[in-house]
Each structure stands twice: as structure tokens, then as C-alpha cells.
Image (tube, rainbow, N blue to C red):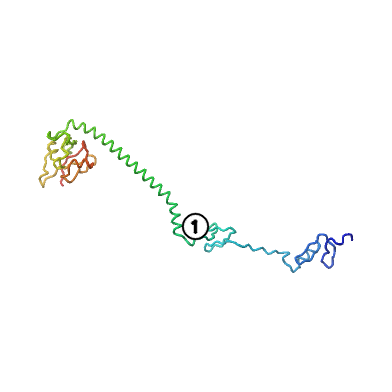
């Protein structure tokens, strides 16, 4: 034999042939390819035919109740710092809720809605104010035009100074008569009614307890100017209750 030091002899007792590429069993014996498979089937070292799977350490189990899912990667709750699987990782599943944390989360969600509502309310308020201002401006302009017309036809006591005069278009619903009149802004409402009734030639029983009383109403909304006849006309005008040159209704009421 030319190369007696190369290779290994097959350990099978009936073979003993020299093999240059022997197969070694886990038991330490070497065999030729023909006898290796026969040997491992009966070899006491079972790891040749079945390799036990290696146990994986650091597996993270879901801490949600009755969940058996596990993961090699931790999915930690930012609140309680426990691991949850993908299905249960939502913060509402946390078993140790932090009220302050959830309050902050709710505030984050509520802030944009609140800011939108505040902005909307501010815009709505501004629009409403603009409409009121435009309506008032239009009413004031129309009132000024009407006031100029009333002044040319109004009747009243000539003794009232021009600077003290306030003008009204007064309608009596029973007769349908419209009378432009002027009275003094320093008068009380009761005295003004007496003077207007006189100019309109209407019966005035305001001093009689059992008779119907004359009262002034606003033509726009049919609201009584004031229940207190002692109110001064100048104050009523300053407070915006009535306007110089406004349309009024003078009629009888039971009370």
C-alpha cells in the first residue's frame, strides 16, 4: 500500500477498509459510506438521527389576560411598561391605567376640537355684530330721511325750543290716521302722550281710572315703549328704546 498513513479504516468488523473520506459518528467511531448509515440506525447516540431543537431564550409573552401570544421583539406599553402583542398593544388595554396619562391623551384629542369651536364662535359672533351694525346703520339712514320729511309737516307746541324737539310719525289704528308731531325731549312719557293725543284730536281719558288708557307702541315690533309714564323721553332715546323720527302707534288699552 502506497499511502498507509492517509485515511481511516472503517470500524465495521467485517469491513476494515481504508477510506480517505470517512464519516464519523457522534460516538467517535468512523465508517465508510456503505456502513455509516447502518451504524447510526442502531447507535445509542440518538443525536445522529434527531437533533433536539435549541430553546430560544428571552421570549416576550403578552401580558393581556388569557392571551398566549409571544414575540422575540418587546412591544412595551408607554404607560405601564409591560409587553403586549400587536393585537393588544393599544393603550386602552393597559392593566394599570394612569389617569394623568389618559387625561393628557384626551386633552390632545380635545384641543383641536375646542380651538375650532372657539374660532367658529368668534367668527359667528363677529358676523352677528356686523349684521346688527349694518341693520342699525340702514335703519339710522332711513330714519334720518324720514326725520327730514317729518320736520316739514310736524305739529306741536311752538313754545318748545327747536333744540329740545323730538319728532315722531304717530298712527292711530282705529282711524288709520298718521300724524307727524313733535314734543319736548325733556318731557315725561305721560306728558308726551297727552300732547300727541291733543294734536291727533283723540279722546284722552288717562286721568280716569275706569276708562281705557292711551299708550304709545313701537310700530316695528308692537312693543310698548314703557310701562312707566314717568320715564323721560330723553333717557328713552339715549337708551335706544326709541329714536328721533321713529314710527309710533297711539292706541287705547284696557290696562
Outermost residue to the bottom = 44
Q: Which residue is mark 1?
A: 91
Front residue of 92/252: it is 92
Outermost residue to the right = 1
Quarter occupied by the N terminus:
bottom right
Front residue of 81/200: it is 81
Outermost residue to the top = 152
Front residue of 207/123: it is 123
Front residue of 223/130: it is 130
Find residue 77 and report its horizontal and vertical position in percent: 52, 58
Find residue 254 and report its horizontal and vertical position in percent: 15, 46
The image shows residue 140, relative to residue 27, as above or below, that is: above
The image shows residue 169, relative to residue 117, as above or below, that is: above
Which residue lies at the image location 19% right of the left edge and 44% below the top edge? 226
Label 1: element kind: helix
Q: Quadrant of residue 31?
A: bottom right
Q: How many marks?
A: 1
Neighbour class for label 1 at 10 Å: few (<14), some, many (≥20)?
some
Find residue 177 and report its horizontal and vertical position in percent: 17, 35
Which residue lies at the image location 81% right of the left edge and 59% below the top edge? 21
**107 sits to left or right of 203:** right
Amino acid at each position: 500500500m502506497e499511502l498507509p498513513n492517509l485515511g481511516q479504516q472503517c470500524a465495521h468488523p467485517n469491513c476494515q477498509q481504508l477510506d480517505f473520506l470517512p464519516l464519523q459518528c457522534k460516538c467517535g467511531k468512523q465508517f465508510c459510506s456503505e456502513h455509516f448509515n447502518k451504524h447510526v440506525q442502531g447507535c445509542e447516540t440518538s443525536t445522529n438521527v434527531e437533533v433536539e431543537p435549541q430553546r430560544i431564550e428571552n421570549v416576550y409573552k403578552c401580558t393581556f389576560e388569557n392571551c398566549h401570544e409571544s414575540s422575540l421583539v418587546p412591544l412595551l406599553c408607554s404607560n405601564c411598561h409591560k409587553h403586549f402583542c400587536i393585537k393588544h398593544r393599544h393603550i386602552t388595554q393597559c392593566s394599570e391605567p394612569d389617569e394623568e396619562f389618559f387625561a393628557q391623551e384626551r386633552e390632545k384629542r380635545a384641543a383641536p376640537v375646542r380651538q375650532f369651536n372657539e374660532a367658529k364662535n368668534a367668527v359667528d359672533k363677529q358676523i352677528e355684530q356686523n349684521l346688527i351694525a349694518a341693520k342699525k346703520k340702514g335703519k339710522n339712514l332711513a330714519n334720518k330721511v324720514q326725520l327730514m320729511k317729518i320736520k316739514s309737516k310736524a305739529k306741536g307746541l311752538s313754545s318748545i325750543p327747536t333744540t329740545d324737539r323730538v319728532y315722531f310719525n304717530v298712527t292711530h289704528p282705529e282711524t288709520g290716521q298718521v300724524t307727524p308731531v313733535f314734543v319736548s325731549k325733556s318731557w315725561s312719557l305721560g306728558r308726551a302722550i297727552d300732547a300727541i293725543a291733543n294734536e291727533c284730536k283723540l279722546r284722552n281719558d288717562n286721568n280716569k281710572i275706569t276708562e281705557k288708557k292711551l299708550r304709545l307702541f313701537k310700530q316695528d315690533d308692537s312693543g310698548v315703549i314703557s310701562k312707566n309714564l314717568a320715564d323721560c323721553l330723553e333717557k328713552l332715546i339715549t337708551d335706544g328704546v326709541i329714536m328721533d323720527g321713529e314710527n309710533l302707534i297711539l292706541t287705547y288699552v284696557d290696562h
